[in-house]
Image (tube, rainbow, N blue to C red):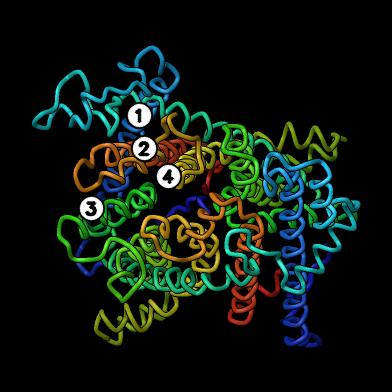
Amino acid sequence: MEISRNTDAPNAQIPVPTVVRPETPDLRVRRRVNLVKWLGIASGTFLSIVALAGILAPLIAPWDPVYQDLTAMFVPPFWEPGGNVHHLLGTDELGRDILSRLIYGARESLLISCSAVALAAVFGTTVGLVGGYAGGSRRGFAILLDRALLAATEISLAIPGLVLAIAVVALFGPTERNLILVLAVFGWVVFARLARGLVLGLHNRAFVEAAQILGAKHRRIILRHMVPYVLPHIIVVAALQVGFMILVESALGFLGLGIQPPTPTWGNMVAEGREYLNTNPWEGVLAGLTITLTVLSLSFVADLIRTRLTRSGGTGPAAGL
Amino acid sequence: MPVSLPRDRDPQFSIFSAMKTFIADRFLRLLVVVIGAAIMAFALLRLSGDPSTVLLPIFATPGERAQLRHQYGLDQPLPIQFVDYTFSILHGNFGQSWQYRQPALQVVLDRFPNTLELAGISMGVAVVIGVALGVIGAARSGGVIDSLLTTVSLVARAIPSFWLGTLFILFFSLKLRWLPTSGIGGLSHLVLPALTIAFLFIGEVAAVVRASMVEALHTDYVRAALAKGLPTRTILLRHALRNALNPVISVVAVDFGVLLGGTVIVENVFAWPGIGTLAVQSVGATDYPVLQAIVLLLALSVAVVSTAADIVYGLVDPRIRRAV
């Protein structure tokens, strides 16, 4: 679902009737590569700041995120009239500092989404590797195993993840552990499909056949020859998936099914800000903006990784990503 | 592997039997998916612990709790419980909704048309706008509009829909007072939620259309049309676009689950009385039978849509049914 496809077809110019100078397409490509690079670097910087803020939250947050100051409610950000530098981004309906809450929210969002993606990637990639490897060998039992794993992925795909998450949270409670688990259950399919597809195409490749002829065991072929091939693809998709999981986690928070208040998350901040939309929209607007920028940065970084991997190899592992 | 002709080039091979195998295969998969989803829903409910802690007040006696468990069949062995559960589901019996005191399935089906209406219209809007943008992007590939489109579709995928909906309300309803903030009613109530959901897909549809249009513009039949001197608009819309539309079907089918998920969120932003608001409300009321019915109904509809799309695709494109 979130696997990005390269939308730029290789020869993306329509024949133009005018005479085209030979260096034009080259320049255009180079400009695009440069753009990807600078966007990627800027995004990486932004993400590092967000991640550091999340990790170091207790050290750098100017206020306690749940400290209420009812004498300073709805202070606007410092650039607005009435704002001040004590609360750089202003305060919410209970006089809590919005910047501090965003910093602590980063902690929750990143912890949950990164853990979920890590779990999903490890589990999904394993399933995909085993399935693809078994499905490629033409033995009855192995094909059956591949079929069974495929059926499991299809079942997972059929259940809309968000609804499953809602049900799980309702039944087991909105704790960090449950959220991570349910998001991982939601996300593993992407990795399984990707790994399976890649591995299926590897069976006829010389380096795999050579290993088989040399008598390598299945485990060695998978770990030594297939994992390194699959890994770059997995990393790119994992970066995109972290963004996607941040969106899902904050959506759950928005619906009141994420980590519960007063602990701040980006999602429940948007929900709280919504109540005062007409008069004091800042809390919701800033929280939503933070989510958008973070997710966008992740996709730019994924783009950068992808172009790097593609360019380094030519026909290497990530070519054609 | 011995070299052989593709099966449908083989004169002995009837295309109808290939189609039959293909359809049978898809239906088998559909069955597996539905059974799997049912097992999952069952397991979730049973894993969640003792319903008597939810259903009965905290001061209920152990005897009363045992009686409740007996009443719900929870004192039976798990396999028997599962068989009972399967039978009741097959009879459309998902239990009583605890908040509405009605059959759970009835409660869900009452709301389902609203969700389908919103989801369908949103997807329609996304396809119309996305195709238009994709065609423009392909026709002026590399131009300003094209790169603007790429950027916008990236951003669109990063914006959380619940926040976008909130901003729409802030701008169009509260500041400009053009449209109602929430609820269900005439066409005006549909505009904002449908646009919010469509925003999730416009970028994707545009990207797919653009890519396949660019490809189509390089084919011989487009070159022939150019050589005939047909106007650009005719070439773009009649020749290239028709062939570029197939991938859109698959986007719509693959994203059906995402569409439903997006609708569930956005319904809550605009207080749209569909399944999404019902689900969140049922969580608050710990109305498990309704939640279960929602999960199974959505899983069933996603599975049916993807099966249908597969079959349509197999009918349209012989390369796909060959790959069974």
CA–CA distance in space, label 1 to label 4 = 14 Å
Q: Which residue is mark 2?
A: A269
The kind of secondary structure element at disc 4 is helix
Q: Which residue is mark 1?
A: A102
Q: Which residue is mark 4?
A: A254
Three-letter code, disc 1: Leu
Q: Nearer the viewer, residue A95 or B130?
A: A95
Dot 1: chain letter:
A
Asked if residue B153 lies left or right of residue B116, the reply is left
Three-letter code, disc 2: Met
Give the number of the disc on residue B63.
Answer: none
Dot 4: chain letter:
A
Marks 1 and 3 in Cβ contact (< 8 Å): no
Marks 4 and 3 in Cβ contact (< 8 Å): no
Q: Residue furthest left?
A: A81
Q: In the image, residue B23 lies at what x, y percent? A: 72, 78
Q: Residue at x 31, y 76 (%)?
A: B186
Q: In the image, residue A33 lies at what x, y percent? A: 34, 41
The kind of secondary structure element at disc 2 is helix
Three-letter code, disc 3: Leu
Marks 2 and 1 in Cβ contact (< 8 Å): yes
Marks 4 and 2 in Cβ contact (< 8 Å): no
